[in-house]
Image (cartoon, helix red, strand yellow):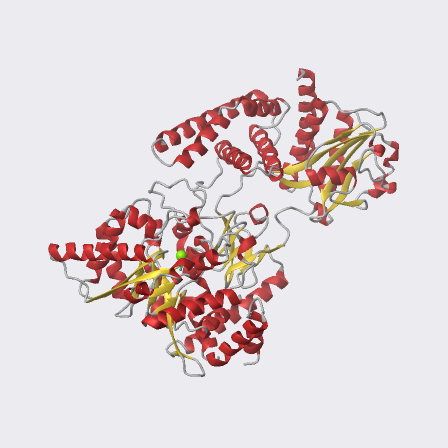
């Protein structure tokens, strides 16, 4: 690149910075900038179009087009050449605009006089903010240097927009991150919460996009890249013998960190007048824009590695980041793209609400949120882009709606809703000590799911009759090393003490799939939900299972104990697991430990295969608990973590209910106690239908006991069963409409 071009663009950026530092109001600033650019680029026209809403671009400033058309001319994304730049995030460079594909004539602008057109996207970290255009009468194709220079300028404009430099009248000029935003997501845990945003990974804000000492910026960049390389090498060293996948990611990081192309592009940007962080961010922005275009999963992964690496570099350069030492705000509402169950548990009950941009209702993070009774909204598009740390936010977990920086009316309405929730909770408290008996005299056992010590106080508070599912893996997930046997003994003892004689069903370690222990070597599996998980791991590598069984036996110490194994797919697995229990008991006996007064070993039915196990299995097993979350995903072949497919299949689908009925019948033959402990047990409509199919024990998160019991007290299971049968005979796909009609009439 010629030095003269570099100094030209540096001059332009210098002038831009002056414009930015001036006291002018937003519009005047923007006008000045278009003038500067047209002047420097030697074009008659320079215009800035900004998004007014998701779909509409508005001409916000121009040098050269009719001034009356400013804030009047609008186009939809994809419309005309400007709309095309915005839609595809790509440069349009043509010497003959009126004859270019997609050209749309805007008579009010007077643009028919101009032949050549160069439009570049104004984008920040993959977020499209608008389009910057230069036009001239002379029919010329702009040189690649000119395109490049305009892109650099567009990047600076994007930064300035982010910083609110163009704030003024009109929606398109109103400050970003200050407007009220309503986001529709998916409800994953009900409840309403008000609080302040806490970003799991805060975005880095670049406050100095333009720099006047390229040499210094280069040194800063090189210093930061060096620090980054050393850091990556260190990470590589540590994980050399560990997880293959993590190693691959780190290798990719190292490759990028040493990539000449990446460095060269950033150095060029600095030479043109950008600061080191702006140069990094420009690269990152382009990687993100590419990421949204590529379909290939591998390539997307690599681009996302690059994105991550740029983030690290930005954090080094700006000193901002996840570990800035900032403190959680009051009433924190966690915002993240996605989060694993382990990370979420670390935050624990300090959070008031959680909003995930991706995430899924069936994920274990969602289960943790439910266990902690924290309102959760998933699938909240753009929330990580829109929200800033400390923003006021209201989360409506019932509707799956998020109000970011809400206005007065929303705040008022929302607070009323919170008050209503409190009232409902008081109503449920009044039936806390009542048994769940339906109007036709059927008694349903109301149990709760737990996994943390902190869950236990809910046993009395919710009116649960015991713990139907104690997810022991949560204790393993919150630590960064394998818990010791003595620690487990102490913990399980405390659980049994807190239960005051009410039954507790301990489920042995259910790891694998998305529950990855940070200190265990993960396996590289194409399909982890169908992979080496739960009892499969326990039987193949019995060390941890034996240790856990020992801890459970010792904790019971003369009291009754219930243990169940997750994910049993065939009789033989149950037998093998049971044999492990017996061997462990024998060993404990020899060691002189006091044994439980009574021991029941059950199985979770989470794969359809087990429903068709030999009758002998039903005779031998002490009890069965249906893990509806997994069972449903395998029954419908619909990933519980994939929102797109998960919601296609209603739990009240006749096929699924008939299947449940079949399991009830098989258990009835042998008199095997049966319960249901998936999330559906805690949804009132689903729960009463499960009861109508013959399930007599439901285990759910504590907060659901009130609402489920309240409905059970009002239904006639015989009648409900008939409604379900009729719907089935009519050939309905799901019984929900018929059931809802019945429930509304109560
Ligand atoms: C289930 O699958 O329904 C279940 C209770 O287990 P988890 O959700 O922990 O997989
Ligand atoms: Mg399960």
Does residue 489 appear in the picture of this structure? no
Quadrant containing the N terminus in the rendered view: top right
Q: Position of residue 310 (x, y in %)?
A: 52, 33
Quadrant containing the C terminus in the rendered view: bottom right
> Where on the picture, by quarter, is residue 522?
top left
Quadrant assignment for ligand 2: bottom left
Which residue is painted at 55% across and 51% down in the image? 391
As drawn, the residue found furthest toward the bottom would be: 440
Q: Nearer the viewer, residue 35 or 316?
A: 316
Q: Nearer the viewer, residue 660 or 215?
A: 660
Which residue is painted at 81% across and 33% down in the image? 100
336 lies left or right of 381? left
Which residue is painted at 72% across and 37% down in the image? 85
276 lies left or right of 101? left
11 lies left or right of 352? right
Q: Is residue 238 above or below residue 489?
A: above
> Where on the picture, by quarter, is residue 22?
top right
Q: Position of residue 416 (x, y in %)?
A: 56, 69
Q: Position of residue 741 (x, y in %)?
A: 58, 76
345 lies left or right of 263? left
């Amino acid at each position: 690149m010629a030095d003269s071009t570099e100094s030209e663009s540096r001059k332009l950026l210098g002038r831009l910075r002056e414009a930015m530092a001036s006291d002018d109001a937003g519009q005047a600033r923007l006008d000045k900038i278009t003038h500067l650019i047209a002047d420097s680029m030697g074009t008659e026209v320079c215009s800035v179009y900004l998004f007014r809403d998701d779909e509409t671009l508005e001409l916000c400033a121009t040098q050269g087009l009719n001034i009356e058309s400013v804030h009047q001319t609008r186009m939809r994304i994809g419309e005309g050449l400007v709309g095309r730049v915005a839609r595809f995030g790509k440069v349009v460079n043509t010497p003959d605009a009126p004859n270019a594909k997609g050209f749309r004539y805007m008579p009010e602008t007077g643009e028919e006089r101009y032949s050549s057109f160069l439009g570049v996207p104004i984008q920040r970290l993959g977020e499209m903010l608008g389009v910057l255009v230069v036009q001239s009468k002379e029919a010329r194709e702009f040189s690649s240097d000119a395109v490049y220079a305009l892109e650099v300028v567009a990047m600076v404009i994007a930064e300035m927009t982010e910083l609110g430099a163009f704030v003024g009248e009109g929606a398109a000029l109103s400050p970003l991150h200050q407007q009220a935003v309503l986001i529709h997501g998916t409800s994953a845990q009900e409840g309403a919460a008000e609080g302040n945003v806490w970003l799991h990974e805060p975005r880095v804000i670049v406050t100095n996009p333009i720099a006047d000492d390229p040499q210094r910026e280069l040194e800063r960049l090189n210093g930061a890249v060096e620090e980054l390389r050393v850091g990556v090498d260190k990470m590589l060293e540590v994980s050399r013998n560990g997880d293959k996948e993590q190693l691959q990611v780190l290798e990719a990081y190292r490759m990028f960190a040493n990539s000449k192309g990446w460095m060269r592009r950033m150095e060029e940007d600095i030479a043109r007048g950008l600061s080191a962080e702006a140069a990094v961010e420009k690269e990152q922005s382009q990687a993100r824009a590419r990421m949204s275009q590529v379909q290939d999963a591998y390539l997307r992964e690599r681009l996302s590695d690059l994105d991550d690496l740029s983030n690290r570099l930005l954090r080094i350069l700006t000193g901002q980041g996840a570990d800035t030492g900032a403190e959680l705000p009051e009433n924190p509402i966690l915002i993240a793209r996605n989060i694993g169950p382990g990370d979420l548990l670390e935050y624990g009950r300090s959070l008031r609400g959680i909003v995930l941009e991706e995430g899924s209702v069936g994920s274990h993070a969602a289960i943790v949120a439910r266990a902690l009774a924290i309102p959760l909204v998933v699938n909240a598009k753009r929330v990580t882009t829109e929200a800033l740390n400390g923003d006021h936010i209201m989360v409506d977990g019932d509707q799956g709606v998020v109000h970011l920086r809400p206005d007065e009316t929303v705040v008022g309405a929302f607070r009323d809703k919170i008050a209503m929730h409190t009232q409902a909770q008081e109503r449920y408290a009044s039936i806390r000590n009542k048994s769940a008996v339906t109007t036709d005299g059927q008694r349903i056992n109301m149990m709760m799911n737990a996994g943390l010590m902190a869950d236990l106080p809910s046993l009395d508070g919710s009116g649960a009759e015991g713990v139907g599912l104690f997810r022991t893996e949560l204790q393993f997930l919150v630590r960064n090393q394998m818990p010791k046997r003595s620690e487990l003994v102490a913990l399980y003892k405390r659980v049994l003490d807190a239960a005051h004689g009410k039954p507790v069903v301990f489920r042995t370690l259910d790891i694998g799939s998305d529950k990855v222990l940070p200190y265990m070597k993960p396996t590289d599996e194409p399909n982890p939900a169908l992979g080496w998980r739960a009892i499969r791991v326990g039987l193949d590598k019995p060390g941890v299972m034996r240790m856990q069984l020992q801890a459970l036996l010792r904790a019971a110490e003369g009291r009754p104990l219930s243990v169940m194994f997750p994910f049993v797919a065939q009789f033989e697995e149950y037998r093998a697991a049971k044999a492990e229990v017996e061997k462990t008991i024998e060993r404990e006996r020899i060691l002189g430990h006091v044994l439980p007064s009574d021991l029941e070993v059950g199985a979770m039915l989470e794969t359809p295969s087990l429903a068709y196990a030999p009758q002998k299995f039903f005779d031998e097993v002490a009890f069965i608990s249906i893990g509806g979350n997994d069972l449903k995903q395998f029954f419908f072949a619909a990933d519980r973590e994939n929102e797109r497919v998960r919601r296609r299949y209603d739990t009240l689908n006749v096929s699924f209910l008939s299947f449940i009925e079949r399991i009830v019948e098989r258990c009835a033959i042998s008199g095997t106690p049966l319960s249901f402990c998936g999330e559906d047990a805690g949804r009132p409509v689903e729960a009463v239908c499960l009861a109508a199919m013959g399930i007599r024990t439901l285990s759910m998160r504590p907060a659901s006991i009130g609402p489920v019991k309240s409905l059970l007290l009002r239904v006639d299971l015989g009648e409900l069963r008939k409604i379900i049968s009729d719907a089935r005979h009519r050939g309905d796909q799901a019984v929900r409409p018929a059931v809802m009609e019945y429930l509304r009439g109560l």
